Amino acid sequence: MKYYLAYGSNLNKTQMSLRCPDAKPFGRVLIEDHELTFRGNSSGWGVANIEPKAGCTVQAGLWYISQKDEASLDMYEGYPHLYTKKELDVICDGQVVRAMVYVMKRNLRFSKPSEGYLKTIEDGYADFGFDTAPLLDAVVGSSIKQVL
């Protein structure tokens, strides 16, 4: 078992229960010095990513997952081709926890997410009790960067 940080569609507890039946939500955390972005290719919609950016934070859900869950997430996240895995230290309930997170490994262009994908993430934000304003700001920011 290990800790996993979700910042996109895997915040959605219904989706996670289907994909990762052993996963247990553990808590809410902030990923420091990172920003939430959406990137995709010219023929598709953007998907969530976190990128280093000093002074920014990303809301994330902390899950406790099994090896079977991780294998399922690997397939869903396109590991190791689209996303790679990193270990980050985050603070949950006053304790430092080391958790695995998926980070896009290719520098794809900024793109807005599809409405369905965004709704899945919004539902996940509600599941974890997060304010959706930073999520919507990330969508707008990625859309603006897409045209620049």
Image (spheres, rainbow, N blue to C red):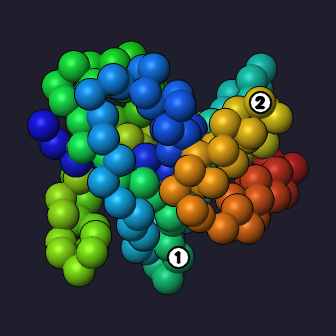
Quadrant in the rendering for residue 33: bottom left
Quadrant in the rendering for residue 77: top left
Q: Locate the N terminus by quadrant.
A: top left
Quadrant in the rendering for residue 84: top left
Tell me residue 51's x, y (percent).
49, 58
> Tag 2: residue type?
Gly
Q: Disc 1 on helix, strand or loop?
A: strand
Farthest left residue in view = 1
- According to the image, label 1 marks what residue? 56
In this rendering, the label closer to the viewer, 2 or 1: 2
Tell me residue 11's x, y (percent).
51, 44
Above or below, 73 relative to 46: above
Q: Residue at x 50, y 38 (%)?
A: 13
Q: Residue at x 74, y 67 (%)?
A: 133
Task: Looking at the image, tell me whether mark 2 or mark 1 is earlier in sequence order.
Answer: 1
Q: Disc 2 on helix, strand or loop?
A: helix
Residue 93's tag is: none
Residue 116's tag is: 2
Tell me residue 135's x, y (percent).
68, 59
For the residue carrying disc 2, how many other residues have a C-alpha within 10 Å: few (<14), some (14-19), or many (20+)? few
